[in-house]
Amino acid sequence: MNYKVTIEGEDHICDAVQQYAEKYAAKYYDNGRTEGIGIAVKALLNLVAKGIITLDSAIVDSGLKKEEFLSIAKSLGYKL
């Protein structure tokens, strides 16, 4: 089967595909980033629980603001 291709049609399809890609790339980037931060916070809190580092050191090492770190820890089930 052959279809007649026009420049306008190609531009329209390219724009649609680009918008779709941008929408889902942003969504999955945010999800991946959130998941990765959660894993890092959990690992740091495990070190705190074992007495290897202090909570303050864990917060500094995470690179997050204290409030954000504590919020993530709370969402992971830690009671600090």
Image (cartoon, rainbow, N blue to C red):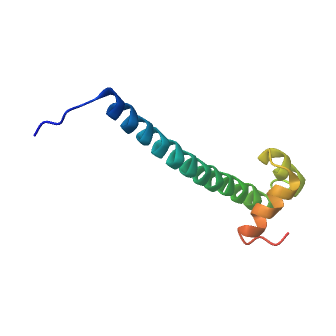
- Locate residue 47 relative to residue 66 in the image: left or right: left
Residue 27, position as x, y percentages in the image = 56, 51
Quarter where residue 73 is shown:
bottom right
In terms of depth relative to the viewer, which is nearer, 17 or 65? Answer: 17
Residue 16, position as x, y percentages in the image = 43, 42
Quarter where residue 79 is shown:
bottom right
Quarter where residue 41 is shown:
bottom right
Residue found 81% across the figure and 56% down from its top: 68
In terms of depth relative to the viewer, which is nearer, 78 or 47? Answer: 78
Residue 34, position as x, y percentages in the image = 65, 54
In terms of depth relative to the viewer, which is nearer, 52 or 10? Answer: 10
Residue 50, position as x, y percentages in the image = 77, 62
The residue lying furthest to the top in this view is 7
Residue found 39% across the figure and 37% down from its top: 12
Quadrant the C terminus occupies: bottom right
Q: Is residue 67 visible?
A: yes
Q: Is residue 30 above or below residue 15?
A: below
Residue found 83% across the figure and 61% down from its top: 70
Q: Is residue 51 visible?
A: no
- Locate residue 56 relative to residue 69 in the image: left or right: right
Quadrant the N terminus occupies: top left
Report the number of numbered marks: 0
